[in-house]
Image (cartoon, rainbow, N blue to C red):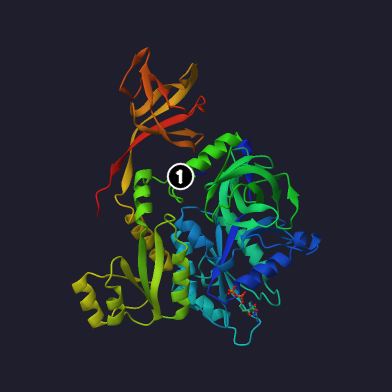
Amino acid sequence: LTFGDEGDEEDWVARPPVVTVMGHVDHGKTKLLDAIRNSNVVAREAGGITQHIGAYQIVTELEDYERPITFIDTPGHESFTAMRARGAKVTDIVVLVVAADDGVMPQTVEALNHAQAAEVPIVVAVNKIDKEGANPAKIRQQLTEYGLVAEEYGGDTMFVDVSATTRQGLDELLTAILLTADASLDLRANAEQDPQGVVIEGKLDKGRGPVATVLVQRGTLRQGDSIVAGDAYGRVRSLLDEHGNKLKEALPARPVQVVGLTSVPRAGDTFLVVEEDRVARQIADRRQARIRNAQNASMRKRISLEDLDAALKENRQLNLIIKGDNSGTVEALEEALMKIEVSDDISLRVIHRGVGGITKSDIDLALADDVIVLGFNVRAEGQATELANREGVDVRYYSVIYQAIEEIEAALKGMLKPEYEEVALGTAEVREVFRVPRIGNVAGSIVRSGVITRNSKARLVRDGVVVADNLTVESLRRFKDDVTEVRDGYECGIGLGSFNDIKIEDVIETFEMREKPRA
Ligand code: GDP
């Protein structure tokens, strides 16, 4: 999804910053998020029964800054990476938690790598300063090596000393977040556009059925809206905030629970609102029919249904051996990799894992088809390298989990043979809609780029959102004549088969799928 400068200026409203807390395990992320949540006025008014819904909004009680902030609070805190891996940008600011009695650790570095790669500003929370042995100056010193230079050292990163236990420094941390937001971000969103956003987490609730926590990113989500989230759809029966309060509407950067979907969407799925339930269902159906993660208009790499069917029949599996420098990273890597889904029937299996360098016995084990050996901050021993080279075993080295995820995801997609890529043919803008008896609606259009060709594949784009995919140009006419193609600048009538939901100003994109040369 793109969130460009659209709509009228007066429709743009200020929105709160969206913050993700990241850092090394045990440095206090969970406790800090709890401390922030519990110290805010809204939570207390609701009687303290705050449910965990994956994201929450607080209103700061600071003197000059009575303003809301949205925190993403998902277990494991891997959602930032998971969402980034799926193309969704959720976070405006990363709070990097570093324990003052410990120091910069591997996951600290990984977290800051992710934040820097996503060009998200970082506020450093130096936590546990209540502890004996806390050395906040050392943390500042260590992080300069990674380009995070504290303001007091002449840099531009805000460091705040905090204790999640004594709550010392929490106000300063919230202030730093807001100052960073004001200094480096334009936090506005169009509240009048068609609502769009991203799923933070989804679950099946015993009483209420599928429940998704979503973050509205633009527009205003309202009770009663017809919504598509990933390949789930439905009518928004109720919107609930983190205290279980019913909301009539949710503005940009508001996390809400959505009740009323027919199935459970996944973290990182984007959602959009359409005019009718029927359209929501159509879009969801089409998405279900495709590979589950190919759901985004910007996703140009598409895989045809035929290929998917072939892959389904073969039921492929990619085997992994994971070696790493310590058990924590091996576990974290395995956990992150197991979340990759390319399709239901192409699966990943970790056949062996361990701490230490890659040995000859690891390579022996890998001498089967489709095994990739991953070394995380470790290397293969001499004999192992020799054997791997001789037998052509795929050994890969990583020091950043995100990169490993990307490459393994690419490897899984590579197993869907052959891979196709989409080649754009032309676009046409709908000027009028004609109702033709027995044929249905025909789009009176003007070709805006390229060529519109009869029988080519097509999709329909409305206000920048793909409302229907997998269509075919079934009829093409100029005046009364059937033609095979119409070029840029000319008017024509386009029939999309049984698909009739065509509106003036819709854009018809046509394309073909070409087999991609294998690398
Ligand atoms: P996470 O793995 O980063 O989410 O870390 P947790 O929030 O689970 O905290 C790990 C441990 O550190 C827990 O035992 C916390 O009680 C403790 N802890 C977290 N923050 C502080 C703090 O500011 N001071 C002290 N003394 N202990 C803390």
Mark 1 lies on residue: 289
Report the residue at 54% width, 82% height from top: 102
Residue 298 lies in quadrant: top left
From the viewer's perspective, is residue 86 above or below residue 501? below
* Element assignment for label 1: helix
Q: Residues within 10 Å of mark 1 (few under 14, many from 20)?
A: few
Name the spot of residue 466 as percent of width and height, x first: 48, 38
Position of 44 with respect to 438 (left or right) is right
In front: 314, or 251?
314
Across and down, in percent, residue 343 comes to 42, 54
Image quarter hosting the C terminus: bottom left
Q: Single out the residue that lies furthest toward the bottom.
A: 132
Residue 336, above or below 329: above
Q: Residue furthest top?
A: 480
**Nearer to me, 164 or 147:** 164
Q: Is residue 49 visible?
A: yes
Q: Nearer the viewer, residue 312 or 164?
A: 312
Q: Is residue 342 left or right of residue 151?
A: left
Furthest-left residue in this view: 390
Q: Amino acid at mark 1?
A: Ala
Point out residue 210 in the picture as x, y percentages from the top left corner: 63, 52
Picture quarter with ligand 1: bottom right
Residue 491: image quadrant is top left
Q: Is residue 4 visible?
A: no
Question: What residue lies at 37% left-to-right and 18% top-to-bottom?
Answer: 477
Q: Residue at x 49, y 16 (%)?
A: 437
Q: Is residue 28 left or right of residue 397?
A: right
Q: Position of residue 17 (x, y in %)?
A: 61, 55
How many marks on residues?
1
